[in-house]
Image (tube, rainbow, N blue to C red):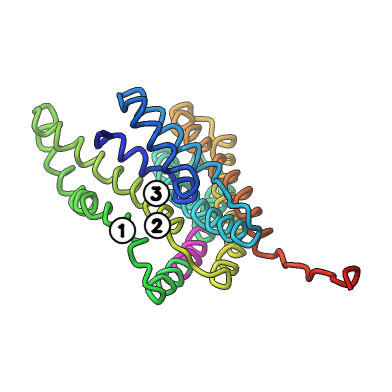
Amino acid sequence: MINMAARVALRAYPPSFRERYGRELEALVEDTGAGPRAVADLLVGALRAWLRPVMPEESAERRRRRMQASIATTWVTWCAALYALPMLHFVLSEEPGLAPDLVWQLLDVAQYAMYGAGLILLVGGLTLLAETSRTGNRTAWRPLVALLPTLPTWLIAPLLLAFASIDPIDRISYLIGALAVLGPAAFLITMAVTPAVAVTRCRPSVKVLRPLALSGVAVALAVTTTAIACAAALTMNTVYTAHLVTMPLLAVTIAASTAALVSSGRGAKAALHKEHPVDLGGDV
C-alpha cells in the first residue's frame, strides 16, 4: 500500500514520464516500500524528469512535447528573472549615487523587455486556455488551484508587516512577520511552477504550439537582459553589502537565462521542423 507522501511524489513526475514508466514505478514503490528515503529519491527523480523530459518515439509527438516543455520552461525562467528585478532595484536604491547611470539604463531596458515578454506569455496562456477549453481538456488546469491558499498571504502581506513592526521583539509579532515574508514567497513560487505544470498537462495542437514556441526566443532574450543588468550591477558597484545580495541574484538570472536560451532554442527548432515527403519512386 502506497502512503500519501509517496503518491504525491509519484504525481510530481511529468505526464510524459508517468505515461511511459508510471505503472512500473508505482509497482516498484509497492514492492520496496515508501519510507522517507524512498520518497526523497522519488522527488529527486521527479526533478530530473522535469529537467530532462521523456519524449515519445514518434517524431511528430516528440516535437509537440518538446514545444510544450520549452513553453513551460520559459515561463519559469521569466518568473525567476521578474522576481529578481525589484530586489535588484531595492539593493541599488539603498546606496544612491553608487550605481552608474549605465546600470540604471540597463535595468530600465530589462524591465521593459520583461514586461513585453510578460504580454507574450499572457497571450500564449490565454491561447492555450482557449484551446483546452474548446477540446474539453479543462482538467489540465487543476494545478492552478494551488494558488488559492497562498494568494491571501500575498494580498495581506503589507498589513502583516505593519502589525509585526509594532513590537518586533514580541514572539507573536515575530511569527506574523515571518508569515508576511514566507506567504508571498510561497505564492511567487507557486505562481512560477503551477502554470508550467498545467501547460505540460495540456494536449494542444501543433498549430497552436508553434507560434508560442517561436515567441519563447523573445522571452529568453528578455530574461538574458535581466542577467546582463545584474552582471553590470555587480561589476560596477563597489559596495560590499550590495555584492552580498547581488551575487545570488546574478546566479539566479544567469541560470534562468541559460535555461531559457537552451530550451527556447530547442522549442524553436521543433517548431520550424517540417516533415519531408517520402520519395516512393524507387519502390515503383
How would you classify the magenta stretch by its main secondary structure?
helix
User: Element under label 2?
Assistant: helix
Q: Looking at the image, is 262 positioned above or below residue 171?
A: below
Q: In the rendered structure, which amino acid carries the disc numbered 1?
A: Arg
Q: Residue furthest front?
A: 284
Seen at 43% across and 43% down, the residue is 22
Seen at 85% across and 71% down, the residue is 280
Q: In the rendered structure, are the residues bearing label 1 and label 2 in contact, judged by CB atoms less than 8 Å apart?
A: yes
Q: Is residue 279 left or right of residue 208?
A: right
Mark 1 crowdedness (10 Å alpha carbons): few <14, some 14-19, many ≥20: few
Q: Is residue 275 left or right of residue 41?
A: right
Residue on which the image places disc 3: 193
Quarter of the picture holding the N terminus: top left
Rounded to the nearest angstrom, the CA distance separating label 3 from label 2 is: 9 Å
Mark drawn on residue 198: 2
Q: In the rendered structure, which amino acid carries the disc numbered 3?
A: Val
For marks 1 and 3, the one nearer the N-term is 1
**Mark in the foreground, 1 or 3:** 1
Quarter of the picture holding the C terminus: bottom right
Say if residue 229 shows up in the picture.
Answer: no
Residue on which the image places disc 1: 142
Mark drawn on residue 95: none
The one of 209 and 278 positioned closer to us in this rendering: 278
* Place of residue 91 in the rendered image (x, y in percent of width and height, measured from the top left): 42, 39
Q: Is residue 59 left or right of residue 104?
A: right
Corner quadrant of residue 132: bottom left
The residue stretch that appears in magenta: 114-123
Mark 3 crowdedness (10 Å alpha carbons): few <14, some 14-19, many ≥20: some
Q: In the rendered structure, are the residues bearing label 1 and label 3 in contact, judged by CB atoms less than 8 Å apart?
A: no
For marks 1 and 2, the one nearer the N-term is 1
* Place of residue 21 in the rendered image (x, y in percent of width and height, measured from the top left): 48, 42
The answer to if 50 sits in the magenta stretch is no
